[in-house]
């Protein structure tokens, strides 16, 4: 999960215009979001419970929207997730790694 978060940050670097202008960046971000959300579903309930402020169920639901979005992906919604939700998720993942005794 941390690798995906890092890649998304690297690809976007907080630059909405760059994200909007590049299908390559959009595809890379969407792919990493897909991998990230799939990985989140593999976390145990006990681990998720250590970060109750993260909306784990909604994260799984977002994965379904990305993977099964037959009508296309809502790029503004993807950007909102990148900008507003991923920083808190990255912090939570780092805390979970620290609690597990592994370096972030």
Image (spheres, rainbow, N blue to C red):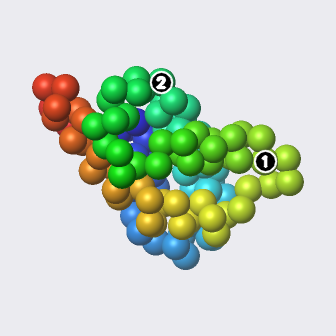
Measured along the vertical axis of the image, is residue 18 above or below residue 104?
below
For the question of whether residue 48 can be seen, the reply is yes
63 versus 25 height, above or below: above
Give residue 63's position: percent from left, percent from top: 62, 42
Q: Please tell me whether mark 1 or mark 2 is closer to you in this view.
A: 2
Task: Measuring from the top left, give residue 42's x and y in whole percent.
Answer: 48, 24
At a point 63% along the width and 64% down the height, the residue shown is 77
Relative to 9, residue 36 above or below: above
Q: In which quarter of the image is the N terminus?
A: top left
Tell me: 98 left or right of 17: left
> At 52% from the left edge and 60% from the top edge, which residue is drawn?
81
Residue position marked by numbered label 2 in the rendering = 42
Q: Tell me the quarter of the picture where residue 98 sits.
A: top left
- Which residue is label 1 attached to? 69
Q: Do the residues labelled 1 and 2 touch (CB within 8 Å)?
A: no
- Determine the residue located farthest toward the right in the rendered image: 71
**Image coordinates for residue 97, horizontal then vertical, percent:** 23, 33
40 relative to 49 in the view: left or right: right
Observer-nearest of 90 and 30: 90
How busy is the neighbourhood of tag 1: few (under 14 within 10 Å), some, or many (20 plus)? few
**Disc 1, SS:** loop
């Amino acid at each position: 999960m941390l690798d995906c978060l890092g890649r998304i940050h690297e690809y976007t670097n907080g630059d909405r215009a760059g994200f909007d202008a590049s299908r390559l960046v959009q595809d890379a971000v969407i792919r990493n979001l897909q991998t990230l959300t799939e990985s989140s579903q593999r976390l145990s309930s006990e681990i998720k419970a250590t970060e109750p402020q993260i909306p784990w169920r909604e994260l799984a639901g977002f994965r379904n929207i990305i993977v099964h979005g037959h009508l296309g992906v809502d790029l503004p919604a993807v950007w909102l997730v990148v900008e507003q939700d991923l920083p808190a998720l990255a912090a939570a993942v780092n805390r979970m790694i620290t609690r597990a005794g592994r370096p972030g």
